[in-house]
Amino acid sequence: MQKRRLGRRLWEFLGVLCVLGGAAAFVLLLLLRADERFPWYTTAREVLTGAETFLRSLRPKPLFALAIMLCYLLCAKVPIFALSTLCLVSAAVLPTPWALLLNTAGVSLLCTLKYRQGDKKGGGRAWDIVLRNRGLRTLLEREGAGNPWVLAALRLTPICPVGGVSRLYGAMEYPRGGFLWVTLAGLAPRMVAYTFLGRGVFDPLSTAFLSPLILVLLISGFTLLFWDTLLRFASGKKSREASYSLQEFHEIQKKRKTKL
């Protein structure tokens, strides 16, 4: 019980931290709109511009795109790269439309492979956690049909692994077509924001970088607070049900004593 409370407190802390970070980035963006620059930024921008020119001049681009797809394929076996990392790197080298298309294809490949793995071998550790929590299992399974709203919310949450959630829904035998569409829709805000972050990473005090950063932080913060509130509600409901059952038990005992 104490570990669960610490986990929920951590989610709450991270959620509030992300929201505050997004607010701070928004204030910084407003200040920079007034053309206020830090003295050291000019030198740093020259170094970043050199790195940007080097990366954008890399040839051939198809080999780089193939390397990114191989990274997504590798993540289906060993999750060594985060979705944010692959989106940032691809957008730093490729044009934004191509980076978005590449990341969409990579995520589709990764999620499909993990879904099949869950369908054949089970949900792994994530499924074990679900089995231990009756309320969470009911929420996810939705009377055996799978809950698309929970899937979308999990995709919006940054700390939920893309592959782990895919394997979990594969184990629940959620329809594959609907699974992929909901997955892409839920991940779309994060993928777009990460891609534009990668596009503006060489000018971190620009609107092109700060705007998607604010979006990422706010999405992360509010989804973490949403799950924290949901877990609190589920925990409170469970305790109320337990207390009601105990009260009911005492009433039965009193009736028995009266009859005797």
Image (tube, rainbow, N blue to C red):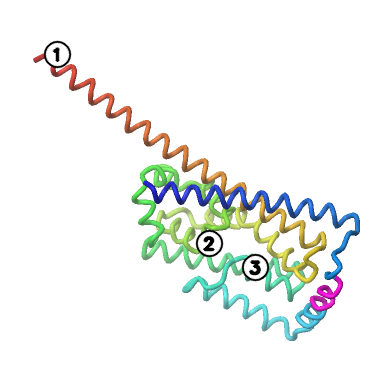
Residue with the mark numbered 1 = 258
Judged from this view, the residue extending furthest toward the front is 39
User: Residue at left 72%, top 54%?
Assistant: 214
Q: Which residue lies furthest to the right in this view?
A: 35
> Residue 154, position in %: x, y?
53, 52
The residue depicted at 56 percent of the width and 50 percent of the height is: 13
> In percent of the image, x 39 and y 42: which residue is there?
135
Callout 2 secondary element: helix
Q: Please state, as top left, top right, bottom left or bottom right, where the C terminus lies in the image.
A: top left
Task: Give SS at disc 1.
Answer: helix
Q: How many labels does the image show?
A: 3
What percent of the width, then of the height, locates residue 49? 82, 76
Of label 1 and label 2, which has the lower sequence position?
Answer: 2
Write down the region rendered in magenta: 42-49
Residue 94: which quarter of the image? bottom right
Q: Does residue 107 lie above or below 231 as drawn? A: below
Residue named by callout 2: 162
User: In the image, what residue type sits under mark 1?
Assistant: Thr
Indicate the position of residue 29 as horizontal and vertical percent values.
Answer: 81, 55
Task: Write down the residue under mark 3.
Answer: 103
Structural distance between the alpha carbons of marks 1 and 3: 71 Å
Of 128 and 204, the residue lying toward us: 204
* Mark 1 neighbour density, 10 Å: few (under 14) some (14–19) many (20 or more): few
> With respect to residue 111, does 77 lie above or below?
below
Check disc 3: other Cα within 10 Å, few if <14, some if 14-19, many if 20+: many
Identity, as a three-letter code, of the amino acid under mark 2: Val
